[in-house]
Amino acid sequence: MKERNSYFTTAMAEGLAEVMREDERVVVLGEDVAISVIGGTRGLIDEFGPERIVNTPISEATFVGACIGAAAAGLRPVVDMMIGSFFYVAMDQLANQAAKLRYMSGGQVELPIVYFTGTGPSGSAAAQHSENPHPMIMNVAGLKVVMPSTPYDAKGLMISAVRANDPIVYFQDAVLGGTRGPVPEGAYEVPIGVGDVKRTGRDVTIAAIGATVPIALRAAAALEGEGVSAEVIDPRTLVPMDFDLILDSVAKTGRLVVCDSARLTCSAASEIAATVSERGFDLLKSAPLRVAWEDVPIPFSPVLEKRVLVNDDRVLAAVRRTLEGAEVKA
Amino acid sequence: MAEDVKVNAPTASEQLDMLRLMFRIRRFEERLIELHRAGRLPGFVHLYIGEEAIAVGVCSALRPDDRITSTHRGHGHLIAKGAEVHRMMAELFGKVDGCCRGKGGSMHIMDFSLGILGTNGIVGGGIPIATGAAFADKHQGSDKVTVAFFGDGASNQGVFFEAMNLASIWRLPVIFLCENNGYTEWTPTEQLTAGKIADRGEAMGVPGEQIDGNDVMVVREAAARAVARARIGEGPTLIECRTYRHHGHNQGEEAFTGNYREEEEIARWRANDPLQKLMERLVTAGSATEHEMGAMDLEEQTRVGEAVDFAEASPYPDPEEALMHLFADDLNVVRT
């Protein structure tokens, strides 16, 4: 398949277009999806028209819920939430309805819905436009959660998510939207529930999520100069989480740092660190460490925002701590 | 309202079918009172007694392939839409032969095969879902209609207004069917609700009317007009049915609520009983005798009794079923 460099959001839109071509039941709804400020649906209106690229009023709870009924009535709705913080407006319909109807009905119904969104800090967007709600959505039960970190994964996971038969929340970390990477033409899947080794190494495992993946990769490159070989793993899917891939890596390295673009408390990083501790305690040579946001809302001023978020230095510091006392081969 | 839309009045035979369903709901609910008092039913029970004319009147105007969303007080809607009482009863007992294999209970009974997209434990929770089903039907060129049943309390939820707006701009085949039983849980609705609920769609171009929810023929007629409008693409309608719940918000409430309703009020509404009203009409019209209706009532009591037997005989689900039915592929976690 031909491959070229694409932007992250362009890759998402390409993935959507692929499944829209193959399945006319796929309909995209959301605020300003015809124009698409963030870019995940940009250009789709030209090919698919306003019947399938449907602008909604700013009524998050209602269009998030409407997709449940639409799915039960035979469509495969895809919702662009635009900004991850806006999920909070729709939490009843997401957490009480979309996540629970199949389970409460004893498995009577399949609800193929994708809720995708730009999410997380994008640079002084401040507290109400910078949330990353994936940890609390992971805790809901009944929603699958994906969070790609490369344009390749973004397209493949979009295609897999829209083809799947469950409600899936798809997070596109905002700072990754303008990144570029190789993306094949045509349709391909990145399987849901399967993580990816983004860099192989032998001394320490860095499991990283969303926007922290490129940070972890930079840290790993810097560590190489110090003679430390770091393996970087991107789970890509947070529910269901590919714990085995992380455990396999920890079995090799014996050390774990988990990076998350979310607040530390009950983060995905917390879940990974806890699970590895439970299931892989004997594999560990040092305590797993988490690197995540400070437990505060995201502040506005650039200097304040920077203080809260994950950065290269914090990841490097965590890796060095896990290696204290270890003999590292240069 | 679109008074110009003509609808057929139900035949005598159809009226008798409606009466039968009203008996079924009434007797089903009465058995729940006993079963709840005896501690046989886990969880909450919200009774529909007194409101039967609404569910039956509305659903009698629907086709089998039309859809509904229901509420926490949903047993009547389910029965009127064709749900089998023995599977409902088994669900209320938490048994494996229940509609939802014991996972839903009273407030979450669903039967998607009958177009029942869920009762709902969240007040107003079904309104967006109904609106979305109507969107899908319209999008797919179907003439199906969806009814969102909700209570007066839900009329103060934001999604009610949002959904009416959405349904209006997209002219969706959805009917917003408010059952105003006068109480928002334990507080008189008039203390909590500005204006008339039926008027709340007007600003958004959703025609509305307030009707007598205790007269099944009135309900049927209004619903049939709204359904006809929806089917021909004229969009949503709001109907507010005035009614009264003979019993409390939920069974067992007296332990904490005390008497919050006047005896006179309860007596007045009980005298305005929807079943009595229909029976009198049928007798007056010569469509049925007291004896025939009594026999029908007994048949429905028997049916409900058999439902209880069925529920009692049904086993509980295997506890491991608690871990099933979350996802379509039934995988909670991969590669564990």
Image (spheres, grey):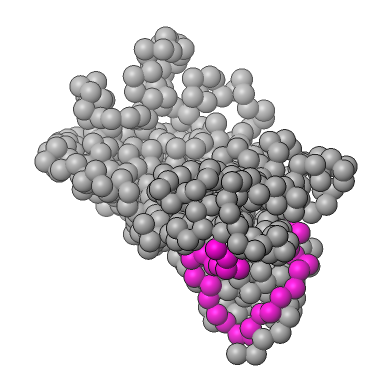
Which residue is at 24% across, 43% downward? B319
Which residue is at 55% across, 35% downward? B154
Instruction: Confirm whether the magenta stretch covers residue A2.
Output: no
Residue A321 appears in the figure: yes
Q: Quadrant of the C terminus of chain B?
A: bottom left
Q: Position of residue A190 (x, y in %)?
A: 53, 72
Q: Position of residue A313 (x, y in %)?
A: 75, 50
Instruction: Confirm whether the magenta stretch covers residue A190.
Output: yes
Q: Nearer the viewer, residue A2 or B199?
A: A2
As drawn, B175 above or below A5:
above
Q: Nearer the viewer, residue A169 or A195?
A: A195
Q: Quadrant of residue A175?
A: bottom right
Question: Start and end of the magenta stretch?
Answer: A174-202
Q: Position of residue B127 (x, y in %)?
A: 54, 46
Q: Position of residue B124 (x, y in %)?
A: 54, 40
Among all residues in the image, which is located at the extreme bottom? A2
